[in-house]
C-alpha cells in the first residue's frame, strides 16, 4: 500500500513511523525547507507518552525531557495554594506528564519516521490531492492520502470541507527560559492580569513559561517590544516567576499565538483522502488531557483496517472530547480577529 502524508508535523511524522513500520510505503511531503519548529516547549500527558512509547522513542523522549507526576496551583504572589498527584493517563508505568523542547521532539519523530523507512520530502508542497500533484510539477500515485497539514489545512479545503478555525479570544505568550531549581512540575496561577500564568520544565536546565491574555493584535511588535509586553504582563507574578522574569529579554525566544478551535464533522475522509491531527480537530484550551490531540488520529490509524468505514468509526470512538473545545473567556467577540490571525510565527506551534 502506498501512502502520501501531507505535512511533517507531530501528526505526519508519527503516522509515517507507524505506517512504515506496519509495512506500508510512505512518503511525507513537508513544505518547509528544513525541520524547523518554534523554539518553545510542549507539555505531553501520559496518553501522548504511551503513543511515543509505541513509536519506540520513549527512551529518547525521557532522556531529553523532564517528567513529573504532580501539578500545583499558586497565588499571584507565589504562595502554594494546592498541589495534587496528576492523572497517569498513559498507565501506571509512565509518568503523568513530561515537558520537552519542541525542536527536540520534532527531531526525535523525524528520525523515527526515517528509521522506519518513510521517505521525507522537504520543501515539497502538495498542490492537489486528486490527482496528487507536487509543487515541482511532478505527480504521484497513492492508495491513501493523509492531510496532516495543520489547522489551516489546504488538503481539508481541497476536499471541499469548509470548516475553518475560529479564534477563541485567548492569546498565548510563551518564553523558553532557564529552569530555576524550584520548578519541578507544571504550576498554574489563576489570577492577576492574565487568564492563566503557568510554566512547565522541559529539561534539567530549561522550562517554558506561558501567559494567557485576551487576544490582541501583536503583529507589529518588534522582538524587543515582545519582551517588554510579556515582562509587563508577568510583573505582578511572584515566587518562581521572579526568576523567570529575568529571562524575558529581547534576545529570548518569545512567541505570541492566538488559540483557535476547530472540529470538523465526521467523516474526516472523502474516498481515499483523510485529514488528521490539527487539520481535523484542534483544541484551544490549556486543558492538560485535552491537549495531545495531534496523536489521536495517527495512533488509531495503523490499528484499524484500511477500509474507509472502519477507519472513521474507530477514530470517532477514541476519547477526543469535543466538549473540551468550548470557547474561552473572550469568545464572545471572535470578530476581534484582525485581518487573518495574530500569529507572529507561521511555523508549527
Ligand atoms: C499556543 C499553543 C500551545 C500548545 N501547547 C501544546 C502542548 O503543550 N501539548 C500538546 O500536546 N499540544 C499543544 N498544542 C497543540 C499542538 O501544538 C498541535 O496539536 C500539534 O502541533 C498539531 O500537529 P500537526 O502535525 O497536526 O500540525 P502542524 O504542527 O501544524 O504541522 C503541519 C505541517 O504541515 C505542513 N504543511 C502545511 N500545508 C502543507 C502542504 N500543502 N504541503 C506540504 N506540507 C504542508 C506544515 O509546514 C507543518 O509542518 C498547542 C497549540 C498551541 C497553538
Image (cartoon, rainbow, N blue to C red):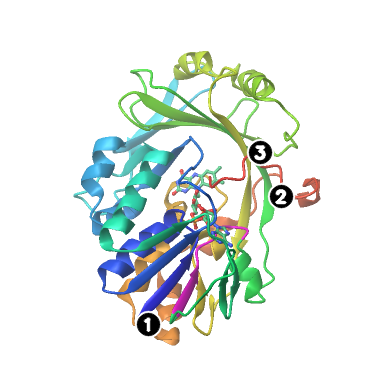
Residue beneath the point at 38% across and 26% down: 206
Q: Could you say where residue 337 lies in the image, as x and y percent from the top left?
A: 77, 47
The numbered dot on residue 65 is none
Mark 2 / mark 3, whichever is N-terminal: 2
Pick whichever, 294 or 150, lies toward us: 150
Pick whichever, 191 or 334, lies toward us: 334
SS for callout 1: loop
Q: Is residue 119 visible?
A: yes
The answer to whether residue 127 is above or below residue 65 is below
Give the total of numbered labels: 3
Residue of label 2: 331
Cα separation between marks 1 and 2: 38 Å
Quadrant of the image occupied by residue 21: bottom left
The answer to whether residue 244 is above or below residue 66 is above
Cα separation between marks 3 and 1: 39 Å
Marks 2 and 3 in Cβ contact (< 8 Å): no
Residue of label 3: 344
Q: Of discs 1 and 2, which sits in the foreground?
A: 1
Using residue 213 as the reference point, say whether residue 67 is left or right of it.
Answer: left
Using residue 58 as the reference point, say whether residue 293 is left or right of it.
Answer: right
Q: Could you say where residue 204 lies in the image, as x and y percent from the top left?
A: 30, 26
SS for callout 2: loop
User: For the magenta stretch, what is the residue range?
Assistant: 144-152
**Residue at the farthest left position:** 93
Residue of label 1: 306
Q: Could you say where residue 46 lies in the image, as x and y percent from the top left?
A: 31, 50
The answer to whether residue 82 is above or below residue 301 is above
* Magenta stretch encompasses residue 145: yes
Cα separation between marks 2 and 3: 20 Å
Q: Judge the density around disc 2: few (<14), some (14-19), many (≥20) Cα neighbours within 10 Å.
A: some
Pick whichever, 25 or 328, lies toward us: 25
Amino acid at each position: 500500500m502506498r501512502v502520501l502524508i501531507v505535512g511533517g508535523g507531530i501528526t505526519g511524522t508519527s503516522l509515517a513511523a507507524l505506517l512504515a513500520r506496519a509495512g506500508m510505503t510512505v512518503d511525507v511531503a513537508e513544505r518547509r525547507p528544513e525541520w524547523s519548529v518554534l523554539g518553545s516547549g510542549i507539555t505531553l500527558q501520559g496518553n501522548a507518552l504511551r503513543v511515543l512509547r509505541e513509536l519506540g522513542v520513549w527512551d529518547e523522549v525521557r532522556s531529553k525531557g523532564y517528567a513529573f507526576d504532580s501539578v500545583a496551583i499558586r497565588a499571584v504572589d507565589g504562595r502554594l495554594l494546592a498541589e495534587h498527584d496528576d492523572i497517569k493517563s498513559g498507565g501506571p508505568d509512565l509518568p503523568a506528564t513530561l515537558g520537552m523542547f519542541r525542536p527536540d521532539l520534532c527531531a526525535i519523530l523525524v528520525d523515527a519516521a526515517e528509521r522506519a523507512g518513510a521517505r521525507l520530502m522537504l520543501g515539497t508542497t502538495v498542490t492537489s490531492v486528486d490527482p496528487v500533484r507536487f509543487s515541482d510539477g511532478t505527480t504521484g500515485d497513492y492508495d491513501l492520502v493523509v492531510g496532516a497539514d495543520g489547522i489551516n489545512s489546504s488538503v481539508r479545503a481541497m476536499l471541499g470541507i469548509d470548516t475553518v478555525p475560529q479564534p477563541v479570544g485567548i492569546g498565548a505568550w510563551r518564553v523558553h527560559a532557564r529552569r530555576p531549581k524550584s520548578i519541578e512540575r507544571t504550576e498554574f496561577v489563576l489570577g492577576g492580569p492574565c487568564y492563566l500564568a503557568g510554566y512547565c520544565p522541559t529539561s534539567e536546565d530549561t522550562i517554558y513559561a506561558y501567559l494567557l491574555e485576551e487576544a490582541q493584535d501583536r503583529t507589529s511588535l518588534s522582538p524587543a517590544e515582545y519582551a517588554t509586553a510579556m515582562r509587563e504582563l508577568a510583573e505582578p507574578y511572584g515566587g518562581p516567576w521572579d526568576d523567570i522574569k529575568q529571562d524575558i529579554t529581547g534576545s529570548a525566544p518569545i512567541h505570541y499565538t492566538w488559540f483557535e478551535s476547530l472540529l470538523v464533522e465526521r467523516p474526516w475522509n472523502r474516498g481515499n483522502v483523510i485529514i488528521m491531527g490539527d487539520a481535523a480537530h484542534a483544541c484551544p484550551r490549556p486543558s492538560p488531557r485535552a491537549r495531545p490531540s495531534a496523536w489521536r488520529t495517527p495512533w488509531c490509524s495503523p490499528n484499524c483496517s484500511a477500509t474507509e468505514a472502519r477507519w472513521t468509526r474507530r477514530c470517532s470512538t477514541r476519547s477526543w472530547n469535543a466538549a473540551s473545545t468550548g470557547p474561552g473567556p473572550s469568545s464572545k467577540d471572535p470578530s476581534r480577529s484582525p485581518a487573518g490571525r495574530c500569529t507572529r510565527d507561521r511555523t508549527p506551534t
